[in-house]
């Protein structure tokens, strides 16, 4: 390869998504309810509502549910999975892996590799990126990569309106067994401190408007543009595009800047119903697209993680999508299954009362 094409990542062996699944908690906190508490109902909300994990839910339990959906979708024996990777910025233990609990709960053998991944909101996509490399090298047949998070917004902070709970699981394997094959990928990172949380602190801090132009937009545009240039494509070559969704306006704006139409991003734009699910944001959007995609459809997926970086993926839906086993619950099923809660219930569920 010459020029910028040398940065394109393509494995020796073609890799694809052989199974996928999502999980979204049923509880929903309306943005108007947050505004009622903190602004007297003034100022509006960047999303309609957000998903809230229940008292008995955390990254582990939600990752298990998404993983089970992915296994049903793939129709494989869990013991054939050789690695389980969970990306999150809200792992329930500071010192104890989430991945080993998930692996044992879904019935894999102990003869696997397990790891937890962290990179703010792109922890899930970096696990996917690494899995492409390991499967593509021929070292293993199947790897389960998960992006899952619970809401982490300081009471009264702007993040509280959008920080939701949920995520998705992708089972990666040989392209010939896949529902969508990876055509190429690319990653772009810089040291941009737009969002951070030191050890021992309960809530993250952020750079307010600094999180937009030099952070989200600069990295998402750079990753997407570079990948499309290396793949010799334009926005018109894709049927669908899905971007990280910290709110509704950011992905819609970045899509317009890249030349995508509202129709191209509609199927995967879920932020208004479930909020920003952090590590699983663009991944859960991709599950919604795959649930209705037709064979031959081309998809661009671009993640974003504060700190900062983006992973961009070019995928082609295969003929196998037309006959895949239905997961226990589709992404649309989880979105439709909703129970509204008030702010007091949210405070209790998410343990917001601190000493």
Image (cartoon, rainbow, N blue to C red):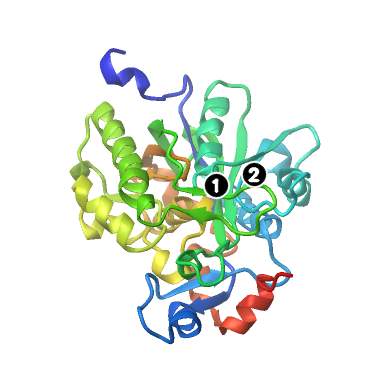
The residue mark sitting in front, 1 or 2, is 1
Q: Nearer the viewer, residue 20 or 321?
A: 20
Say which quarter of the image contains residue 215.
top left
The number of numbered badges drawn on the structure is 2
User: Please, is residue 91 above or below residue 174 in the view?
Assistant: below
Classify 10 Å Cα crowding around label 2: few (below 14), some (14-19), many (20 and above): some
Labels 1 and 2 touching (C-beta < 8 A): yes
In this view, the residue farthest toward the right is 110
Q: Which mark is residue 274?
A: none
- Return the residue at label 2: 76
From the viewer's perspective, tell me whether residue 188 is left or right of residue 88.
left
* Res. 120 in view: yes
Separation of residues labelled 1 and 2 (CA atoms): 9 Å
In this view, the residue farthest toward the front is 355
Q: Residue at x 39, y 31 (%)?
A: 186
SS for dot 1: strand
Q: Residue at x 41, y 86 (%)?
A: 41
User: Please, is residue 187 above or below residue 159 in the view?
Assistant: above
Residue 312's spot in the image, x, y percent? 38, 38
* Quarter of the image where the N terminus is located: top left
* Quarter of the image where the C terminus is located: bottom right
From the viewer's perspective, tell me whether residue 194 is left or right of residue 120.
left
Q: Which mark is residue 19?
A: 1
Q: Nearer the viewer, residue 77 or 352?
A: 352
From the viewer's perspective, tell me whether residue 109 is left or right of residue 335.
right
From the viewer's perspective, tell me whether residue 267 is left or right of residue 25.
left
SS for dot 2: loop
Q: Residue at x 49, y 49 (%)?
A: 195
Q: Earlier in the sequence, mark 1 or mark 2?
A: 1
Residue 244's spot in the image, x, y percent? 40, 51
In this view, the residue farthest toward the top is 2
Say which quarter of the image contains residue 340.
bottom right
């Amino acid at each position: 390869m010459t020029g910028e094409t040398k940065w394109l990542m393509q494995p020796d062996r073609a890799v694809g998504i052989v199974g996928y699944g999502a999980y979204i908690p049923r509880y929903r906190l309306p943005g108007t309810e947050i505004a009622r508490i903190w602004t007297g109902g003034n100022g509006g909300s960047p999303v309609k509502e957000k998903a809230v994990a229940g008292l008995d839910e955390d990254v582990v339990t939600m990752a298990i549910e998404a993983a089970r959906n992915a296994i049903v979708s793939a129709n494989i024996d869990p013991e054939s999975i050789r690695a389980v990777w969970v990306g999150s910025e809200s792992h329930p233990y500071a010192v104890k892996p989430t991945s080993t609990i998930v692996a044992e709960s879904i019935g894999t053998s102990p003869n696997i590799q397990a790891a937890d991944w962290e990179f703010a909101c792109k922890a899930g996509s970096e696990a996917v990126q690494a899995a492409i490399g390991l499967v593509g090298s021929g070292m293993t047949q199947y790897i389960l990569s998960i992006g899952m998070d619970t809401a982490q917004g300081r009471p009264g902070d702007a993040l509280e309106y959008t920080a939701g709970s949920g995520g998705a699981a992708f089972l990666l394997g040989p392209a010939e067994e896949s529902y969508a094959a990876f055509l190429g990928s690319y990653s772009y990172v810089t040291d941009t401190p737009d969002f951070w949380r030191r050890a021992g602190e309960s809530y993250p801090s952020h750079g307010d408007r600094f999180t937009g132009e030099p952070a989200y937009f600069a990295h998402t545009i750079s990753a997407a543009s570079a990948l499309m240039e290396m793949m010799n494509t334009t926005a018109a070559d894709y049927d669908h595009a899905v971007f990280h969704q910290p709110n509704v306006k950011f992905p819609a704006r970045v899509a317009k800047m890249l030349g995508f139409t509202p129709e191209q991003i509609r199927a995967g734009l879920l932020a208004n119903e479930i909020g920003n699910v952090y590590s699983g944001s663009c991944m859960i959007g991709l599950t919604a697209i795959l649930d209705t995609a037709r064979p031959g459809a081309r998809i661009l997926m671009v993640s974003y993680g504060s700190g900062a970086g983006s992973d961009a993926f070019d995928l082609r839906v295969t003929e196998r999508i037309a006959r895949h086993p239905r997961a226990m619950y589709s992404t649309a099923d989880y979105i439709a299954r909703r129970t509204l809660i008030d702010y007091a219930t949210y405070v209790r569920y998410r343990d917001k009362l601190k000493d």
